[in-house]
Amino acid sequence: MTAQPARPRRGGAGAAPAADVPPYASSLVKTVFRNVTSLHVSRSAARAAAAVTRTVVAEIIDGAKRAAADEGRTKLVPRDLVSAIDRDVTLEVGSEWYSWTPTFHGLMGTLRDADGTTISPRQYRSSRTPSGVDGAHMFEAGTKKLLRSRGAKAVPAMVRDLDGVASVFLTDLARSAAMVVREGGVKRFGAVTLGPPAGPPPPLSAADRALTTRNGDRRTIGSDDILAATTMCLLPGEVKQHALTEARAAATGVCAAATEPGVSAAETR
């Protein structure tokens, strides 16, 4: 009798490790993008956007862990999020969420409308809920998985804050990527500096110049558009560079799938 090859059991040898499955799935990314733009999102772009979001939230978790450790705690609480941002301004992302969570009440300054009239937090929250805030609950499973992978535990309020930051950040990333496609590249560069200008702006780097034009059709968001959007959504620093590195690796992994049987090159774009 011919021996039959053993089939890998679910969760056993031969199965994909849980760590290899991204916490924020491509299907979630595409759902968020559909709420922002009618443009098609390629598979590589969805993987890249998921990688950027995962990297940013992981960096926030690590910063919050350090803040909790300084107080002799192992479980993360919302004030650890505030401390992480205070220590590293490049972690200040998804700021639209801050107006909708009790964590940042009293820390956002005075809100005013176009006429200069003060807007109370209750009035602000009674307005139409932004899609990024409204969709925060969809990120809970991924956030909990990411917390476990970073060796962290968090109270429910902290999990909700991480969900909200992730949702709003990915929504901002989707808007920026759609803008890159619409405008044919990144057209806005620069940084905010307090004080009078010290002279003409510095010349663009070679990497920035490459982002000023894009190749491809105007109906599809590709992985390069996600990279360009990432440069718009994150401040310069290690978090941004790490996110770009992870996004490129994720996009490359999708492209490599075209060599697998049954996967066409068109499906990876």
Image: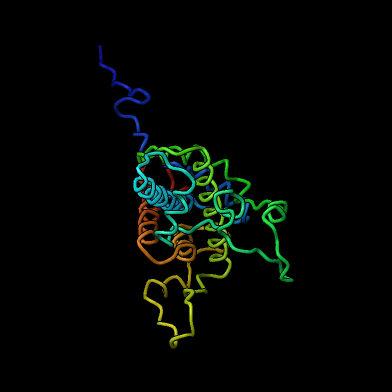
Residue 264 visible in the picture: yes
Residue 254 visible in the picture: no
Number of numbered callouts drawn: 0
Of all residues, the one furthest to the top in this rendering is: 1
Up/down of 5 relative to 182, above or below: above
Q: Residue at x 73, y 67 (%)?
A: 117
Residue 246, image x, y percentages: 37, 53
Of all residues, the one furthest to the bottom in this rendering is: 199
Residue 115, image x, y percentages: 74, 71
Point out the image quarter for the N terminus.
top left
Up/down of 252 relative to 207, above or below: above
Q: Residue at x 43, y 61 (%)?
A: 90
Up/down of 179 relative to 73, above or below: below
Q: Residue at x 63, y 51 (%)?
A: 131
Residue 258, image x, y percentages: 39, 47
Q: Nearer the viewer, residue 233 or 96?
A: 96
Up/down of 237 relative to 197, above or below: above
Residue 166, image x, y percentages: 51, 49
Q: Residue at x 45, y 62 (%)?
A: 234
Colour scheme of the picture? rainbow
